[in-house]
Structure formats: structure tokens, C-alpha cells
Image: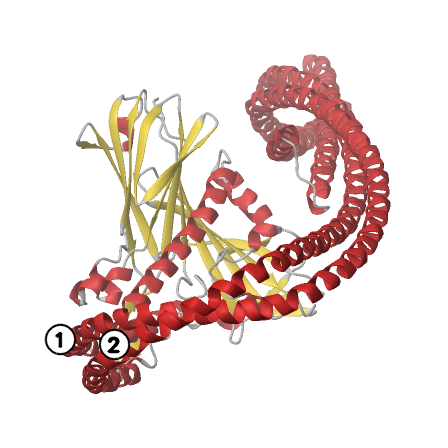
Amino acid sequence: MRKNSRMMRLYLKRAAAAAVAAALTVTLACTAPSGRAFAEENAAVKSGAAGESQPGLENKEKKAEKDQKNSKEESVYVIADASGAAKKIIVSDWLKNPEARKSIEDVSDLDGIENIKGDEVFTAGKDHALTWNAEGKDIYYQGTTERELPVTVKIIYELDGKEVTPQELAGKSGHVKMTFRYENNAVKAVEMNGEKTQVKVPFAVVSGVVLPTEHFSNVTVTNGKCISEGENQIAVGVAMPGLRESLNLEDGADELQDIELPESVEVEADVENFELEMTMTLVMNHLLEGLEDGGSLDFSRLGDAAAELTDASEQLQNGSNELLDGILTLDGKAVDFRGGASELLSGIREYTDGVAAAASGAGQLSDGAQSAVNGAAELQAGAQSALEGAGQLESGVQGLVSGAGQVDSGAQSAASGASQVNEGAQQLKQGASQVAAGASQVNEGAQQLKGGAVQVSSGAAQVDEGVQKLSSMLDAMGSQLQKQIEGYQQQLAELQEKEQQLAAGLKTVSEGIAQLDAGLSGVNQGIAGLEQIMENGGNLTEEQQTQYIGLLKQKVQLQEQKDSLQDKQDELAANKEQLAAGAGKLSGAVEALAAVSGQLSDPETAEQLRQLAEGTARLRSGTSDLSEGISKLAENTPALQEGANSLAGGTSDLAAGTEDLAGGTKTLAEGTGSLNQGSKTLAGGVSSLKSGLQTLAGGTVSLKEGLFQLAAGSMSLEEGTNALHAASQALLDGAVQLKDGTDQLKEGTGQLAEGAEQLRDGIVKFDEEGISRITELLSGSLSGLTDRLEALKEADKSYNSFTSLPEGMEGSVKFIIRTESIKAE
């Protein structure tokens, strides 16, 4: 029972260690500055190695079998406030398609589903059914939901022993305590001993937080560990909420009650000017998937084992009684045997003294010859081992030469990629400057358009007033109307010119977006070059690791800048359409006024006046639309100018970073070339060493043959004397030992009799106080634990998706909860 409880405790520790390793990866990787970037970064990770299941918890054969079937791997990203309350839940699903099916059947009730890694589309059916047009590929998609999380986290902050809110804690100094409390909400109904009962799905919850040494010191973690990493300290803790309750350990045996299954995590530190970027919490299940796979926790035969243990105890008691009877008989016969042994020893001593002198000389000669033979054999074996080692060394050096060549090739690819990234960054920097200049022109033009709109509106009012006085001022009105038409035509020309300027600005923005795409392509090439080194089995230097992280951050920054410019491009396009519509209406009004002016002298004056009134109405409508469009343009142009300036600054930083990357990859390429040449030189030296060892091995064979002949002669001389000496000496030694042994035998039989009696009494006591108690325990507390473990395994196995799974498809799910930052205003 103790063995099984220890094994279960060790297994839970291994599960916790695997969870901590996964949480450390997430804590260090997921540091994007916004919720959108957080989701995009993790979605990108899903397309690579981060899609693996929880390390160390899954049987290798089962995982290999699962990888050959269509399955669904789900990652749930929770964006929470500083206290842990969820604000947004983003679910990223990976539909694995190892059979390369053309279509994949899925079920999902997510909102806003979008394909995040391809152009494949889906067809929606009844009851949230989805059919993806996969064409043999894996599908990566994401959406949002408002479902209740299976595990929720609440973070409580205390400053100098007093509970405070995150906002109150920002910027404060003192002793801070953060308590992560977890609530397991996932309850499953299972059958145990023929009855329905409820248990909580076993989850491992790991929370991590990065604490800069600038603000935090004397960090301690309850149910976790603190790890130093440069200028930061990473505090990580693990808990298993609800597992102790589901196992009912409080009502079990003492050996089970001391199993530690933490329900919360506490982090304490001394703080100066408190601020916190975020906390990360990883929630995952399948903790009990490995139980009984290797037979280490097999409880199925505990009842049979208890019965066998009781039978063995009874047999042990019977055997101890028989042993005591035999030992008492032996003790009585030992006295007679001791007297005969003393007389035999006296006669043998006289015989052996003469034989010893004759055997001495022959023995020395034989010993020397045999030592020489042994030394030759050791020399031969050593030479052969050295020769085999040289062969292994030669094989290893050949592998080193091959690996050095691959590293050299990878370094050259990285250097080429870095150069392309640098060129793209310089082009992007130039394009960003053009975008900023174009935005300035657009802003200036918008202000001029706004003034022109005021003039157009004023002119429309004048036209309307002229129509009212036209009946009495027909002759004078003709001249005045012509002047107004000319003014409107001039304003229309100005509007058309501004429209062309706006079109030029839009073109400049489009060129900037294209240059950003080129920069992103260059950054991706640099990332691919460094990843090629890792795929070829090489390790990145510290400088390459820094460059790799820098490229990833630059990729995120460029993507955000591109998204911002695209938004501004859409707004400017809309404003341009409104401006064009207003200019069209103004042009129609000018044409109407011109027609009216030509008809002022016509006898049908009344009809002409009616047409003039209609023209002024259209003019009013056009100037109103024009004024609205120009106002929207003027409102948006400052935002365009600000975005263009931000783009110019970001591309300058990018250009500087890519220059450093190009220099570093050039140095790496030079170093790998030297490594390649050195490995070839080493291969030549190893070949020479192997040739010399082959010659040495041949010489040791000849030496060993000569020494064998010498040993054969000395052994013939020794045989006669040794045979006699050995027999007599052995006889003497045996007699002495026999005499001593009889004394010891008599003493030992007495002690043995006493010990046998104690053994019999001890076995009886062991059966009463030990075996019986163990039998009761095996059929009692531990039996109940076995039933609950089986029930928990069933609940654990059944929870494989946060949303939904189609029938027959396997799935897995993990949850990543990121809290927002705490900073002083």
C-alpha cells in the first residue's frame, strides 16, 4: 500500500513538472502588447511545434496512434482583467488531417469563425455543423465565445498585509502578496460501484509572472519556484484544484492524507514602485492518462493479494515452530562433534610442515611466468580497445565533418537572408518618408477644400436671392449670373485639383503598404534562415537568439503598421468618393445655371425662371453633400498624418536592426567556415592514429605467444610440488577450521535456539499487529481510492474539447489566461 501511494505521489509530481515546463514556455513567449497580438502570436505558434500535446503526460504509443487519425486540438486564449476575470475568450482550433482528406467534418458554435492560416472555406449546416474544403491540408481557424471556463482564477493583492485593488497597488512600495485562487467548475457524472456520483475533471493549473529585478526583490513562491533570468525573476506555481476533494483523501488512511495536492499559489516579494506587465496561467487536463499503462499503479489484484498475504503469514508461523525444534536437536549433537575435531588437528600439523618447503621454490617460478602472461593479455586487450576506440572516433569525426558542412551551409543562407532583410528595410524606410509627405499634402488640401466649401455655400445663397429678384432685374441679373457661373467653374476646377491630390496621396499610401509587405518578406526570410540552422541540428548562439527574437518582434510591429495604413487607406478612399460625388453635383448645377443664362432673353421667361429655381435647388443639395464630405476628410487627415509619422519612425528602427543582423550573420558564416576546415584536419589526424594502433595490436599478439610458452614450462615444474603442498595445506586448513568451527557451532546453536524462539514470538506479533492491519487497509481505504481513481480517469478522458467535437473525432484542449497590466497612471 505504501508502495502504491508513493508511486501515485511521484506520478503527480511528474505531471506537475511537465505542466511547469509548458507554462514557462508560454510565460516567456506570450508577451504581445495587445489582446489582438496575443491571439495572433499564439495562433502562429499553433502552426508550428507549439501544437504538441502536454509533454510527459501522454503514452508514446498512444500519441503515435492518435497522430495517424483526424483530430482536433483546441487552444483557448482568455484575456482577463488584472484580478483574473475574463473579458474576452478567443478559441483557436487546429483540425489535423493526416489522411489528407478533401473535406473535414467539424462542429463549432464559435462566433466570428475565420481561417487564420489559409484560404480554405467551410459550409455551415444544422446544429453548428461545419464542412471544411480542406483539399488534403490541416485547417487552422479561430473564433470567440462566452462559455463558462472549466477553471477560473481570482488574483488577490495585498500590500503590507492589507488587501488592495490592482489600481490602488500601482506605483506603491512595500511587501506585496499575490494569491492565485482557482475554482474547478467542470463537474462530470460518473458511475462508481454501480452508483452515479459526481467528480471534478482533474486539471493542472500553472500560473507564472515575470518580475523585473528593478522593482521586485526577495521573491518567494508557495507551491512553486522562482527562477532568475537576466534582469527578471520568473515566479511559477502549480495547483490541482478539486483533485483532493474528488479523491476524498481527508477521509482516507494516514498514508494518503499526507499527499500534497495544492489548491492555490502565493507569490510574495518586496516591491519598489509596483507595476506588472501581466500574469499567465496555463490550464490542462489528462493528468491521469498514464496511470496503470506501465503497471506501476495496478490496484486490480489488491483483494487477491490480501488473501495471499494472510495465507503466507500462517505458513510463516508454522515454519518458525518446526525450525525451533530442529535447532534444539542440533545443539545437543554439537558437543560430541567438537571432541573428535581436536584429535584430527594434532596429526595433520606434523605432516604438512615437510611439504611446505618443497613447494615454495616451484611456486615462485610459476607465479612469475603467469604474471607475465597476464600482463601480455592485458596489453593485447588494451591495444585492441584502443583500436576499437580509434574506429569509433573516426566515425564520430566523419559525422562532425558532415555536421560542420551543414552548419556552414545554414550560416551562408542566414547571411544571404539577412542581407535581403536589410535591403527591404531601407526601401521600406524610403517609402515611409514618401507616405508622410503625401499625408501632409492631403492634410493641407483638406483645409483648403473646407474653405472652398464655405464659399460654395455662400454662392448658393446668393443664387437663391437672385432668383427672387429676377422678375424686376432681368437685364442686370444676366450679367451677374454669368459672373457667378464663372466663379463656380473656378471652384469646380479647384475641387477637381484637390481630388487629384487626394488620389496621389492614396497612391503613396498604397506604395507604403507594398513596401511594408516587402519588409515583412525580408524579415520572414531572416527568420527562416535561423530556423533552418535549428532544423539541421545546430544550436543558435546567444547573439543569434537575440537576433531571432528581434526579428519576431519586428514582424509583429510591421504587421500592426500595415493594418493601420490599410484602415487609413479605406477611410481616404471613402472620402474621395464623397468628394467626387459632391463635385459632380456642383458641375450639374453650373451647367443648369449656364442654360438659364442663355435663355434669359427668351420670350418664355416664366418657364426659364422655373428651370432656374430647380437649378438652385440642385445647387443647394450639392453644396451640402460637398460640405459633409470635406468635413469628414478634414477630420481624418490628422490621423493619417500621425500614422504616417509613426510608420517613418518604426521603419528607421527596423533599418538599424537589420544592419546589425546582417553584420552578425556575416561573422557567423566566417566562423562556421573555420569550423568546417578544422573538422577535416581532425579527421586526417584520427586516420593516422588508427593506423598506428593497428601496428601496436599486431606486436602484442607475438609477445603474448612467447610468454605462453614460458608459462607452460614453469607450470610443468610446479604441478608436482603444488599438488602435494596444496593437498596437505588444504587438509591442515580444513582441520583448523573444523576445530574452530565446532566451537563456534556450539556457541551458534545456542544463540540460534534463542533467536528461533524470538522469531516465532515476533512472527505471531507481526501477524496480529501488521498483516491483519494491512489486510483491513487493502480492503478498505485504498480500495475506495482505487474506485475514485478509475472514476477520475473516466472524467479526465471524457473532457477533450471546450466547444464541441464531431462524433468519432479525438480532441485535446488547453487554456491560457493572460491578465492585463498594472501600471500607475
- As rendered, which of 718 and 87 lies closer to the eye? 718
Q: Quadrant of residue 360?
A: bottom right
Task: Determine whether 627 is above or below 808 in the image.
Answer: above
Q: Please, which colouring scheme is shown?
A: secondary structure
Q: Quadrant of residue 134?
A: bottom right
Image marks 1 and 2: residues in contact by CB distance under 8 Å: no
- As rendered, which of 619 and 22 lies closer to the eye? 22
Return the residue at label 2: 783
Is any part of residue 463 visible from this angle?
A: no
Q: Closer to the observer: label 1 or label 2?
A: 1
**Disc 1 crowd, CA 10 A, few/some/many (<14, 14-19, 20+):** few
Q: Earlier along the polypeptide chain: callout 1 or callout 2?
A: 1
Task: Determine whether 700 is above or below 350 in the image.
Answer: above
Q: Which residue is depicted at the point 19% across and 67% down?
A: 252
Mark linked to residue 765:
1
Q: Is residue 781 toward the left or the right of residue 575 in the image?
A: left
